[in-house]
């Protein structure tokens, strides 16, 4: 009986740990919703104010491990919710650890309208390079894209 209880405690603990980890990761639906909220915010307050908000208002624009990124079509980062040091940097030729030019793919996908792009990127929560899928959408009336990614 003691062995069974010990086994049960281990199983329950493992399940609770996995549940807690799942709650720390955003979902694809949450990423899409955050992109759409960001686009609505841009429309409401304008580019300059919205981009600043994405950089500084973490309570609103960072959810779990999700954050808003804005880039122009030349690859310049205009807002980055996880790493403000990237703002102003041109990442057009940036590659992931597998050599994928994912910024170029994000821009190509976004300028067509919207879609998902897969690549590897540093997770600001775990501090490790992890597989990521980003939902990207064109900013209407502006030569740029907004994206939010989920770590897989």
Image: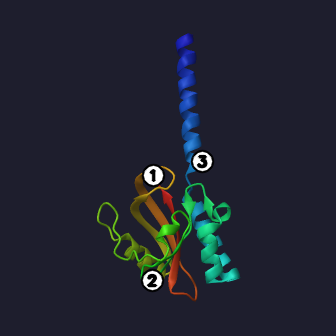
Q: Is residue 66 visible?
A: yes
* Count of numbered circles in the view: 3
Q: Residue at x 56, y 60 (%)?
A: 66
Q: Is the residue 37 above or below the residue 152 in the image?
A: below
Residue 87 at x, y percent in the picture: 50, 73
Q: Which numbered mark, 1 or 2, is in the foreground of this view?
A: 1
Give the number of the disc on residue 127. Answer: 1
Q: Residue 134 at x, y = what percent?
A: 48, 66
Question: Is residue 112 visible to us here?
Answer: no
Residue at image location 43% in from the left, 75% down from the top: 89
Q: Residues within 10 Å of mark 2 (few under 14, many from 20)?
A: many
**In this rendering, the label closer to the viewer, 1 or 3:** 1
The circle on residue 7 is none
Query: Above or below — where is 144 with respect to 84?
Result: below
How far is the residue under mark 3 from the one under mark 2? Answer: 33 Å
Q: Residue tagged by mark 2?
A: 73
The residue that label 3 is drawn on is 23
Mark 1–mark 3 CB contact (< 8 Å): no
Residue 37 found in image quarter: bottom right
């Amino acid at each position: 009986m003691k062995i069974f209880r010990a086994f049960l405690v281990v199983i329950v603990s493992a399940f609770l740990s996995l549940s807690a980890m799942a709650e720390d990761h955003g979902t694809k639906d949450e990423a899409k919703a955050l992109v759409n909220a960001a686009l609505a915010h841009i429309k409401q307050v304008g580019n300059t104010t919205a981009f600043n908000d994405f950089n500084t208002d973490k309570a609103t624009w960072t959810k779990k491990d999700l954050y808003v990124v804005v880039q122009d079509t030349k690859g310049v980062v205009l807002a980055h919710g996880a790493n403000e040091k990237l703002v102003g940097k041109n990442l057009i030729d940036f590659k992931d650890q597998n050599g994928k030019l994912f910024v170029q793919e994000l821009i190509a996908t976004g300028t067509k309208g919207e879609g998902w792009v897969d690549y590897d990127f540093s997770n600001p929560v775990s501090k490790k390079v992890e597989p990521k899928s980003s939902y990207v959408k064109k900013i209407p009336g502006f030569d740029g894209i907004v994206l939010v990614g989920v770590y897989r």
